[in-house]
Amino acid sequence: MPRPPEEFTVPDTLSEVTRRLVQDHLSGGPAVPRARPAELLGALIRTILGQQNTRAAADRQYRALQDAYPRWEAAVLDGPDGIEATLRAAGGGLHRSKAISLHGLLSALEAHPPDHLLSLAFLTGLGDDPARRALEALPGVGRHTASLLLLFDLHRPAMPVEGNLDRLARRLGWVPDSWTAARVERWYDAVVPRTVPERLALHVAGVRHGREVCLSRHPRCPACVLADLCPSAALLGPG
Ligand code: SF4
């Protein structure tokens, strides 16, 4: 049964919080070039490798795949075991599950009529919603991975929400603690202005804020530019 539309309220502090986060973490704004059509598949593979992985490990794994497979067709032929061995040699984690996801993704594209190309260039010709549906239909691509590719590489107004942005919304009192992560993501998507620059800015600055200031266990509230707007500042103490 389709979910009934939810009523979400835009918080009074959203624009001021965004302004301060951008000023504090993104002098000059986020410089994120749009991916060329031929780069989209590589960008998706890089995004999948980045899930639950450090950036350095994901970069190493991606370079190892490129060295091992000058064309992605070679990875399909090598199979999940070969991809896993390549990822394992590069370090990082979740070799088996990522190898299975990547092989499933490449195999699905290869089986995709009419052209059977290992490419995601077709996404550039689709509207925002059809592009999301096409991405989420691929093996190993969930909503969050699709949102990352849509926003960062296709410059579509998606709003990926990971742990840092989720925590920020709860601590600022924008959403109740009882909400699920999926509901918080729907909330962000409903209330943040639907423009690529604003969504890129809030995502990049919010993630940096969560990593550097609004830490999960010991938030640095006295050093936080949001302290006078944040109902959690007093509760969470001096950090
Ligand atoms: S004041 Fe503290 S809890 Fe609130 S956003 Fe800043 S660091 Fe996080």
Image (tube, rainbow, N blue to C red):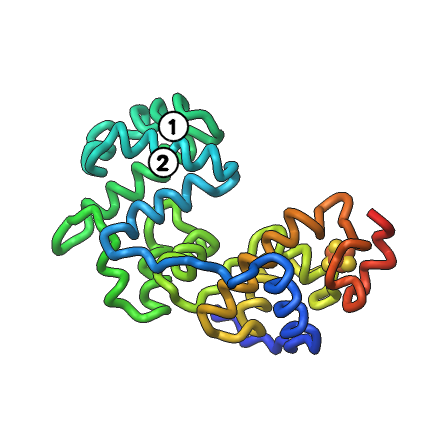
Q: Is 199 displayed left or right of 41 in the figure?
A: right
**Can residue 232 be seen here?**
yes
Q: Give coordinates of residue 194: x percent, y percent.
A: 48, 74
Residue 82, quarter of picture: top left
Which amino acid is tagged 2? Tyr
- Residue 17 lies, in percent from the top left, at 67, 68
- Residue at 34% of width from left, 25% of height from top? 86
The residue at 55%/66% (across/down) is 186
* Residue at (51% x, 66% y) in the render: 199
Mark 1: amino acid: Leu
- Crowd rating for badge 1 (residues with CA inside 10 Å; few <14, some 14–19, many 20+): many
Residue 204 location (% of width, % of height): 54, 57
Q: Is residue 46 left or right of residue 227?
A: left
Q: Quadrant of ligand 1?
A: bottom right
Residue at mark 1: 87
In this view, 157 is above or below 181? below
In the image shown, does 39 or 88 lie closer to the viewer?
39
- The residue pinned by badge 2 equals 62
Discs 1, 2 touching: Cβ within 8 Å: no
Question: Nearest the camera: 206 or 162?
Answer: 206
Which of the labelled discs sits on residue 226, or is there none? none
Farthest left residue?
115
Question: Relative to 27, does residue 59 appear above or below in the rendering?
Answer: above
Mark with earlier residue (1, 2): 2
